């Protein structure tokens, strides 16, 4: 089913309402405007920030890091996840271990990434990768497990190879779960890269945001957060677009 | 040419101003080296950065050097950067009537347990013979939680302290720059390995850094503008930062000076309050090999 | 690989599709107890024969087919096709039309039919042409762009039959392919199937519950007993080919049908 | 070698490496203190860690109830109603796109600095993936089953509890797994950022003074929580294996029961 | 709610199950084009009648049933049961046996049969007893503990029938319930169904592709034309009840069967 006009309108309405509420809270003083600058102020600040070439460079740096980490983590995570789901033995060995790795706050390991990669592009990408891959693996495993046995039997009867089964049966039937996983992975990835930038860096938007926060520059901080959120949401919408294109067969 | 990687504990902290001035005035170039500045999240992260080999010279308190030596990271302070907690203030919301002595049993915000602000809070407890709960709220949470009333007071660093004082949101009830006994709060630190392998680079680096301090003292307007730019704050607050912090910094940085060992010892003693157990003798923490010769701009 | 039969139904080429089932048994382990689905089943199917399998519900017909297709391992005994055991599915030797349509819901009808060809890397245009032919054959011309959930039960089953035919393997295993079809469509489809079979020399193993259909289609009808499934009778249907609807009311036809009927009644 | 043996071997191998690498000086003790010194540090401060664990466990338990319970319920509701799904899902996933960790210090302004803010943060952190995974899993359910239930007069809540959730069990379980892990991470991270109690607090305090053995003693405790949670989930999974019949997961479960004749897929 | 009929098949209680279909149409919107599945269908089914629906594959039989069950809204026209329109499924008035078994894979056979009772909060013991009876009725005694994937195609369909019967609604809609069954089982099940129907006074609407079955079971046979589905004939079957297998070879039977057959042939 596609988003109908009403739903699109409702969505826009909700977005507007959110911003209106934000503006109202701040303007009426229900929330201390020093702590929650109004939406309009924040957006104006955002406009100013985007004028600055340094901020644009930071955004570009962060975006490159994020995309690189994502492009590495997703295929690799998906492959490992797939292997785990396909191979009982491998699964029994690796699944709990991966789960434990997933459950530890990753920021503990930030120093180790500096140890291995130094401070810079590789370290950000490395940490972004590290923050993302576990969730990709875990989600892929689930997605694989939700595939219907009868569809696999059919493919098997036609002599589908491993790769063919993967791409022609697993992939389409896992798609909804997988796209959701991609969405969540992107958020982990983004957070990972930003954390790495906050931890140690020479540039990148995370570094800026950390500074604004410590300096109690709430407008800039919120504008920065809106900026990052906007990037993530754009990505979300991209996936949604893929979703509507690919899943129309679902009723 | 050699590159020296300078690790700075946060962006809006005076070491960044020093290093940036040195870069902008081309003092490193004049010494024949290149500098690469990296900003870390806090002092401990900076130290980890150096230990991981990502920074050659950093600014941190002696306590971390001491703790690091016990953990196999061999480094020393090569230059004395500051002998006081300039700009650090114990603040309460403007409307609050609390005095320092009234804080007994109250909640006081600090950035992180074991951090500089924690040490000052602990010192306050000891010195004023009161007891209060220290609540770590992170750098970003300090002022918001103070204003929201989640904490009754907070140990605020500069120039944030100046900023909120100026805006009238909070007021100072204790200025650590004057109240706390002078001790070596921060120095420039290098790994022993690096000092041995490239003593000349270290020497040149400290020359440039102290050249920057000299330059800043001599050029108020330029520096105030730089601070305002770097920290993204109004010039009047930048000026307060200049007057109350930059002007108080050590100008020669000589670790061989007579008052240094006692100042370092005091610094380590304070850190003990914060739970530091890994104390090494003062002479292991400092190096007197380098005496900065400020680079002329 | 030979071209799809229905395009040029001229000469019956010799196809090699001998099936040998030797003392095959199948035991399912369930949570509660072991179920003996098949016991000591032996069969010899000569290449090019049309063999129909009948038997009461749950007697193991589908299970036997799955084993012949290499989709399930037997608990005991051996199954060979052209002398070689089938340890795993081999679409070059055996094609299957499943009892439940099991179409891929994310593919359109024609993409579903093309699926086995796509797996073999057949070029898009050729694939499409073959799929169109097969869909036409099952009376679904013009429905190629629909997704399975937009089709009726019988239509889905026909897509599934088309998918089985398009592969053109020497052995075709069909599990109640016409169950969801009305009598008229069923007859047309039966005739089409016979035509393809005659033209290509395939071996067909066909499961049905309609005894009339069984006799009408078969060279040989194999009757199975209820659990544990065993073979209780094996009838040669010596009616002349091509078969006509008139034969349905003939005595020979009636006699064969009755004989099967008695077997099934007895065993139930 | 059985999978379990190999896994245990790997764990033992990792532990040995943990002991040897720092001892051999291959990794500075600052980054990874040896296992023995970590255990010793934990043992010496057992009381302190015990107290912190109690605080953290409490926060984890409450957040888990919110995140997993609420996430599954809402995910199931939203996932099974096409219109709300189209309306709400983009909102929810966009909401999750806001980097909460960055805003956490500001959040405490409204949520306070005690356990409430940790619970709120961890709940949100774990809630969204659980909900998203559940809702996505719902979409893979055979619509025919819902139709059948409807024909028998199942109310919305009956459909939810008796059809949607059981049918989506594999996805729901993994949502639970991910959500649960995130709750643990969320509580610890928020404690690390702002708090005066809990394991996260200890980790960040010891980290600030570069006391790495004590830091890793804390990490070890976090790991133990994860192991405990994993054990619990596996128990649920085994109980639920029977619900997953007809899917890949179910095939695995069936194999376990022992229909040994089944061939491996592909 | 009345007790399950087969337990006490003594007196036929009067059940209210009048179905009125007035000028009903159904148009499906697909991506490519609009499909008119049903056009201007009107029907009047008196309470307690056994009505059989026949027609070529894809003519809209299932669609019509879904609309009667309140599971799909018609595009035009009205459908009422006992005078009240059915905007949504109402198990107190209508029960459905689907064309595809649609059992819940995570429930055992008996839990599947109990499902509709559990929804109504029937006590466990009563539920279990009724489910056992229903399973026995469809010949699946002893299979209660199996999961659907452990059952054969026909067995699944029988579980689905049992699930429909156990609900005991005044109107029972059955979509090709016997399609996957062998002739023997099919006949037994047909007789059982007639017995229950006679004992309970239900209205039954039954879809089948077997014309013999249609005439054997029905009071009235409704013949539909292919897309767009319309009603082309409505035959009263006035053979006496109880029906016997001997009637199958009678002339009256043959004539009726032929008449339907001609309709279907013509329209195909
Ligand atoms: N996976 C399984 N686990 C346990 N028992 C099974 C399994 N699959 C089939 N059976 C049992 O094996 C027997 C034979 O099943 P099969 O599907 O081969 O029957 P069939 O002859 O095809 O019946 P139908 O005509 O109803 O399709 C049945 O009793 C069934 O319950
Ligand atoms: N969801 C849908 N979207 C589009 N078309 C549909 C949809 N459902 C059914 N149709 C179309 O409506 C027509 C009638 O379908 P229906 O399932 O009612 O047929 P039927 O009489 O039950 O056939 P069969 O005997 O094969 O089960 C078919 O042409 C089918 O393709
Ligand atoms: Mg079968
Ligand atoms: Mg139908």
Image: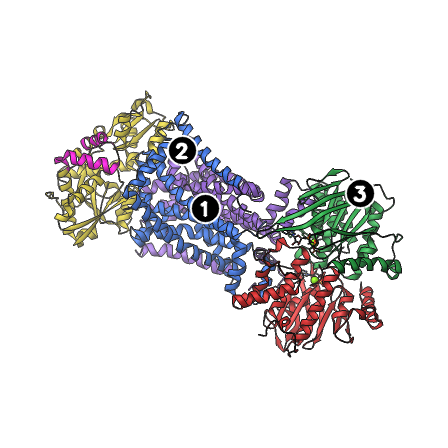
Chain colours: A blue, B yellow, C red, D purple, E green
Is label 2 on the same chain as label 1? Answer: no
Distance (Cα) linking label 2 and label 1: 30 Å
Q: Nearer the viewer, residue D73 or B108?
A: D73
**Residue B41 - label:** none
Q: Is residue B255 visible?
A: no
Classed neighbour count for the residue bearing mark 3: other residues with Cα under 10 Å, few (<14), some (14–19), many (≥20)? few
Quadrant of ligand 4 in image = bottom right
Task: Give the label, 2 or 1, closer to the camera.
Answer: 1
Q: Which residue is mark 1?
A: A237
* Res B12 → quadrant: top left
Measured from the top left, where is residue B26 in percent x and y?
Answer: 15, 45
Of all chains, the one bearing label 1 is: A
> Which residue is label 2 attached to?
D108
Residue C27 locus on image (x, y percent): 68, 65
User: Start and end of the magenta stretch?
Assistant: B216-243
Local secondary structure at mark 3: loop
In magenta stretch: residue B232: yes
């Amino acid at each position: 089913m596609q988003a109908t006009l009403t739903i699109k309108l409702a969505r826009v309405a909700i977005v507007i309402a959110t911003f209106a509420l934000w503006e109202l809270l701040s303007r009426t003083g229900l929330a201390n405007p020093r702590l929650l600058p109004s939406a309009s102020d924040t957006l104006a600040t955002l406009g100013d920030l985007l004028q600055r070439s340094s901020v644009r460079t930071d955004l570009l740096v962060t975006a490159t890091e994020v995309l690189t980490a994502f492009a590495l983590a997703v295929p690799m995570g998906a492959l490992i996840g797939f292997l785990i789901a396909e191979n009982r033995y491998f699964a029994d060995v690796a699944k709990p271990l991966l789960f434990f790795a997933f459950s530890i706050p990753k920021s503990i390991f930030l120093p180790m990434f500096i140890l291995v990669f130094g401070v810079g592009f590789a370290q950000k990408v490395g940490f972004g990768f590290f923050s993302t891959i576990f969730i990709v693996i875990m989600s892929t495993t689930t997605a694989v497990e939700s595939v219907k046995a009868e569809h696999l039997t059919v493919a098997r009867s036609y002599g589908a190879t491993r790769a063919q089964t993967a791409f022609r049966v697993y992939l389409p039937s896992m798609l909804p779960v997988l796209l959701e996983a991609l969405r969540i992975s992107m958020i982990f990835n983004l957070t990972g890269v930003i954390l790495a930038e906050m931890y140690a860096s020479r540039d990148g938007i995370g570094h800026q945001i950390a500074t604004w926060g410590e300096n109690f520059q709430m407008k800039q901080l919120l504008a920065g957060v809106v900026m990052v959120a906007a990037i993530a949401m754009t990505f979300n919408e991209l996936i949604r677009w893929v979703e509507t294109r690919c899943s129309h067969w679902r009723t | 040419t050699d590159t020296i990687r300078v690790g700075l504990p946060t962006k809006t902290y005076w070491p960044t101003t020093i290093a940036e001035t040195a870069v902008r005035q081309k003092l490193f170039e004049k010494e024949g080296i290149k500098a690469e500045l990296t900003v870390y999240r806090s002092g401990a992260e900076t130290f980890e950065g150096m230990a991981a080999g990502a920074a050659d010279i950093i600014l941190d308190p002696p306590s971390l050097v001491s703790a690091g030596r016990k953990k196999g990271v061999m480094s020393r302070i090569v230059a004395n950067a500051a002998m006081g907690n300039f700009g650090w203030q114990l603040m309460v919301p403007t409307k609050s009537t609390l005095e320092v002595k009234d804080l007994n049993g109250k909640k006081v915000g600090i950035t992180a347990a074991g951090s500089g602000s924690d040490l000052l809070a602990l010192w306050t407890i000891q010195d004023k013979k009161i007891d209060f709960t220290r609540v770590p709220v992170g750098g970003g949470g300090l002022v918001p939680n103070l204003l929201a009333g989640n904490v009754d007071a907070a140990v605020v660093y500069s120039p944030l302290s100046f900023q909120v004082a100026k805006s009238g949101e909070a007021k100072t009830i204790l200025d650590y720059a004057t109240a706390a006994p002078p001790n070596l709060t921060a120095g420039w630190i290098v790994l022993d390995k690096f000092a041995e392998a490239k003593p000349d680079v270290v020497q040149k680096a400290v020359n440039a850094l102290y050249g920057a301090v000299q330059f800043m003292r001599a050029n108020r307007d330029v520096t105030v503008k730089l601070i305002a730019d770097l920290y993204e704050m109004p010039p009047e607050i930048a000026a307060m930062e200049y007057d109350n912090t930059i002007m108080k910094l050590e100008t020669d940085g000589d670790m061989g000076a007579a008052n240094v060992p006692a100042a370092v010892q005091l610094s380590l003693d304070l850190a003990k309050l914060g739970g530091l157990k890994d104390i090494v003798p003062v002479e292991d923490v400092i190096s007197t090999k380098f005496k900065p010769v400020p680079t002329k701009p | 690989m030979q071209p799809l039969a229905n395009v040029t139904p001229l000469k019956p080429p010799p196809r090699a599709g001998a099936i040998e089932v030797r003392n095959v048994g199948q035991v399912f382990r369930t949570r509660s107890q072991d179920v003996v689905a098949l016991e000591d089943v032996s069969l010899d199917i000569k290449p090019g024969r049309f063999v129909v399998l009948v038997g009461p519900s749950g007697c193991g017909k589908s299970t036997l087919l799955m084993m012949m297709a290499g989709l399930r391992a037997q608990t005991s005994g051996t199954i060979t096709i052209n002398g070689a055991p089938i340890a795993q599915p081999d679409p070059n030797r055996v094609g299957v039309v499943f009892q439940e349509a099991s179409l891929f819901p994310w593919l359109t009808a024609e993409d579903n039919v093309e699926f086995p060809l796509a797996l073999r890397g057949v070029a898009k245009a050729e694939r499409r042409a073959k799929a169109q032919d097969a869909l036409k054959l099952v009376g679904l011309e013009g429905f190629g762009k629909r997704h399975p959930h937009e089709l009726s039960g019988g239509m889905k089953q026909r897509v599934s039959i088309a998918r089985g035919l398009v592969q053109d393997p020497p052995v075709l295993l069909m599990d109640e392919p016409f169950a969801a079809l009305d009598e008229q469509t069923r007859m047309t489809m039966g005739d089409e199937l016979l035509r393809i079979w005659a033209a290509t020399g395939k071996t067909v193993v066909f499961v049905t519950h309609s005894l009339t259909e069984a006799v009408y289609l078969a060279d040989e009808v194999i009757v199975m007993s209820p659990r544990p499934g065993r073979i209780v009778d094996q009838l040669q249907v010596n009616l002349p080919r091509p078969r006509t609807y008139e034969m349905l009311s003939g005595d020979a036809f009636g006699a064969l049908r009755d004989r099967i009927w008695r077997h099934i009644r007895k065993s139930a | 070698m059985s999978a379990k043996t190999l896994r245990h071997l790997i764990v033992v191998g990792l532990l040995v490496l943990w002991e040897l690498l720092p001892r051999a000086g291959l990794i500075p003790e600052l980054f990874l203190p040896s296992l023995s010194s970590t255990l010793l540090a934990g043992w010496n401060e057992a009381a302190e860690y015990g107290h912190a664990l109690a605080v953290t466990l409490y926060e984890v338990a409450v957040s888990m109830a919110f995140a997993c319970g609420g996430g599954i319920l809402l995910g199931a509701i939203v996932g099974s109603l096409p219109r709300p799904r189209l309306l709400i899902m983009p909102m929810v996933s966009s909401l999750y796109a806001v980097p909460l960790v960055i805003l956490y210090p500001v959040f405490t302004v409204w949520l306070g600095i005690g356990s409430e803010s940790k619970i709120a943060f961890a709940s949100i952190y774990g809630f969204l993936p659980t909900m998203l995974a559940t809702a996505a899993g719902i979409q893979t359910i055979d619509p025919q089953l819902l139709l059948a239930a409807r024909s028998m007069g199942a109310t919305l809540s009956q459909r939810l509890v008796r059809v949607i959730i059981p049918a989506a069990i594999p996805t729901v379980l993994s949502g639970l797994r991910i959500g649960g892990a995130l709750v643990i991470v969320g509580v610890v991270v928020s404690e690390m950022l702002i708090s005066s109690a809990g394991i996260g607090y200890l980790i960040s305090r010891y980290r600030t003074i570069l006391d790495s053995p004590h830091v890793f003693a804390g990490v070890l405790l976090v790991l133990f929580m994860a192991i405990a949670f994993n054990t619990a989930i596996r128990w649920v999974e085994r109980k639920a294996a029977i619900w997953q019949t007809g899917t890949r997961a179910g095939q695995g479960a069936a194999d376990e029961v022992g229909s040994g004749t089944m061939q491996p897929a592909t």
